[in-house]
Amino acid sequence: MTDLTIVEFAGLGPGPYAAMLLADMGATVIRIERPDAQPPRATAISQRGRAKRYAADLKNPDDLACVRKLVSGADALIEGFRPGTMERLGLGPEVLIADNPRLVYGRVTGWGQAGPLRSTAGHDINFIAVTGALAAIGPPERPVLPLNLIGDFAGGSMFVVSGILAALMAARRTGRGQVVDAAMCDGIVSLMTAIHEQIADGEWTDARESNLFDGGLPDYSVYECADGKFVAVGPLEEPFYTRLCGAVGLASPPKRHAPADRKILRETFSRIFRTRTRDEWSALLEQGDHCVSPVLSYREAPRHAHLAARGSMIEIDGVSQSGPAPRFSVDVTHPSSGTRHRVPITSALVADVTD
């Protein structure tokens, strides 16, 4: 991807993270920021890898002309404003794709570019609420927020990145660019495909903690240990379940399919896992196909032996952060902090990029 140039219009959440992923994969990412934006700190991890940063007042005709010139030489752009904002600024897809017919115009929003809520404010919590995802997560008493992973980053960033990459392939084949409308609500619905399959098969109910992946099964659940910490237990397949039961001292695997059997098994596992600390169980069970893992805090996770061996967490400018993902056998990625120096956009600077 080293021959790709992406123009990012500064925003929050899914847009910067999507741009970071593309930069990690080798794209040249140029970020357009407001003139009054604060310089990014080293802890602004999602802003790493930017090749250039320009300050541009998009209401200033001269700056606007420079931005249009810059985009005319780019392969794609990413913006996350409310629908209609870029059009009002004179930077809508009709204008920019007319300037650059091969341009891929990536738009990542919560509600998408069409629909009755398109111009309505919202956050991750709202998008996961209307799609059914939030209602399915948590104990029976109330839904629980799964951080902002599902809406902003899985439903937003990942879908705009995959859409941009697919549209870039098409543009190279056909010479025609297009708009990628990545709505988080659409992405969340797509992420729930496995749940939709279970619903279609009559294997999912609306009651939380009564289904396969929501804590309803004692053999796919979380258990407290002697030190108050937790282990995640998930031996769904029979060979793994049999192996785990033997390892924790059960002479024969208890029955686990009928509701009454599940209640007894949960009580049994709860009692057993409270007899040792989390790390003692991890040492005993993490290897050997038992499907048991320690529940680690975000501070503990980088020190986990497997993540450490893979370099899943790296350090840039003294800040611990995720390493590049996915990984490539030929085009090895080397993420860097990029530049944090921003300069006012001018025709001369743009010419250096586009010529």
Image (cartoon, grey):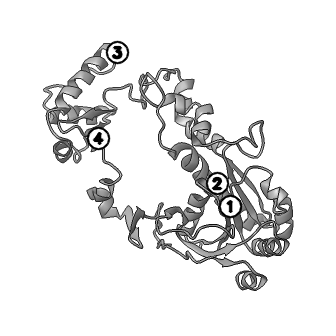
Q: Which mark is residue 78?
A: 1
Please report the residue visible at 39 percent of the width from the left and 25 percent of the height from the top.
Answer: 216
* Secondary structure state at the residue bearing disc 1: strand
Q: Are marks 2 and 1 in contact (CB under 8 Å)?
A: yes
Alpha carbon separation for disc pair 2 and 1 = 8 Å
Along the polypeptide, which appears first: circle 4 or circle 1? 1
Which amino acid does the dot numbered 4 rest on?
Cys
Note whether 350 is above or below 262 in the view shown.
Answer: below
The image quarter containing residue 99 is: bottom right
Q: Are marks 3 and 1 in contact (CB under 8 Å)?
A: no
Q: Which residue is under mark 4?
A: 291
Separation of residues labelled 2 and 3 (CA atoms): 42 Å
Which of the 4 quarters of the picture holds residue 278? top left
What residue would you read off at disc 2? Answer: 160
Identify the mark at residue 237; answer none if there is no mark: none
| Amino acid carrying mark 1 in the image | Ile
Assess disc 2: are there few (<14), some (14-19) or many (≥20) residues with their C-alpha within 10 Å of its C-alpha: many
Rounded to the nearest angstrom, the CA distance separating label 4 from label 3 is 22 Å
Determine which residue is flagged by label 3.
259
The residue carrying pointer 1 sits among few (fewer than 14), some (14 to 19) or many (20 or more) residues within 10 Å by Cα, namely many
Task: Name the N-terminal-most of marks 2 and 1.
Answer: 1
